[in-house]
Amino acid sequence: MVKGKSMVSEEIGLNEALMGAGIEVSETDLGEYIIQLAGETPSHIIAPAIHKTRDDVGSLFADKLDIPYETDPPRLTWIARKALREKFLAADLGTSGCNIACAETGHITTVSNEGNIRMSTTLPRVHIAIMGMERVAARLEDHDMLLRLLCRGAAAQNMATYVSYIGGPRSKSQADGPQEFHLVVLDNGRSRILADPEFREMLCCIRCGACLNHCPVYGAVGGHAYGWVYPGPMGSVLTPLMIGLKTAGDLPNASSLCGRCEEVCPMSIPLPELLRRQRVRQHQAGLGHKRARWALALWGAVARRPRLYQALTRPAVWLLAKLAGRAGRLRRLPLVGGWTSVRDLPAPEGHTFQQQWQARQRRQMP
């Protein structure tokens, strides 16, 4: 089986299930192909191998494809193309995802900047497309608007390089295309989200990746830190809805709520507000670490009393700055070992914001 890029297939563990049944599965998107050879999962919904350098890819290809070590990107692409052509010609079955479907016309649309999806959907005898149930647009007019938003949000393009409208198997008069076409409409928790008035807006997500590209948290920790298929702000909302807050309760808290994700979202999904609602549900359900809940309760009690807040924070800020010294960073600190075990903690400058503001006001006075 040759496989076009599909995030919904990652949701259901399709590759593992098919390989367990004795079927050889080959990813054909270049990024997904690299990830498959490395035995990893995607770190970005649009660019699965964004965390790999060309040196990483060169070493991987030399090891897995038994070729000389090479780091030139065009050359590496040619090597992957040559290896995948053999898979395309030998495959009995091709699978793909579906970016958008149209109820008015009955077709599905795939979008890519590589030609691999067209090869996966036309060369094999059978094509199976997997589509999340929220991907259906009512009219062709709606479909075309979503298509343009997807291309601009994903790669700042007016239109992707390859946009394919697929309406079924080939007819007798057609020279290419599959003899059989099957569309699998996937629920996997989506109907439950649709029934939830607080979170049904999340089903408007078109998986363009714009929120990931602008999120400072995702940029710092990468996609694998999110622990499942969907990383970044959209994943921090969607993953707990699909696999449960008990399993993915850390994700709604992995955000600074800066609001940049909502600003760039082409569908205007209020991601920061949805993250807040997830946090409220988590608190109401009594989930999360007890120490964290106690710490937040203590912080809330102090923050509601300005004089007490200032009396505690001023000496704390001064002490942290002294402990950091000239380095300006703390390598170890009680209560934040989860952070300092893997990276240094930037120390404050020695004065609170209120102190710095007051000093600035005094300097500006005539």
Image (cartoon, rainbow, N blue to C red):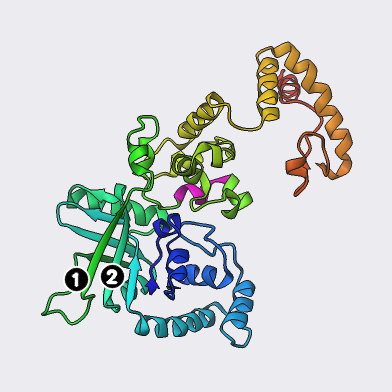
Residue at (23, 75) in percent of width and height: 178
Instruction: Specify few, some or many for label 1: CA neighbours under 10 Å numbering under 14, 14-19, or 20 or more.
Output: some
Depth order, front residue of 48/179: 179
Q: CA distance from mark 2 to mark 1?
A: 8 Å
Magenta stretch, residue numbers: 210-216
Secondary structure beneath dot 2 equals: strand
Q: Are marks 2 and 1 in contact (CB under 8 Å)?
A: yes
Do we see residue 362 in this rendering? Answer: yes
Location of the N terminus by quadrant is: bottom left
Depth order, front residue of 319/25: 25
Location of the C terminus by quadrant is: top right
User: x, y percentage for residue 41?
Assistant: 54, 61
Residue annotated with mark 2 = 127
User: x, y percentage for residue 311?
Assistant: 79, 16
* Amino acid type, residue under disc 2 in the picture: His
Prevailing SS of the magenta stretch: helix
Q: In which quarter of the view is residue 331 placed?
A: top right
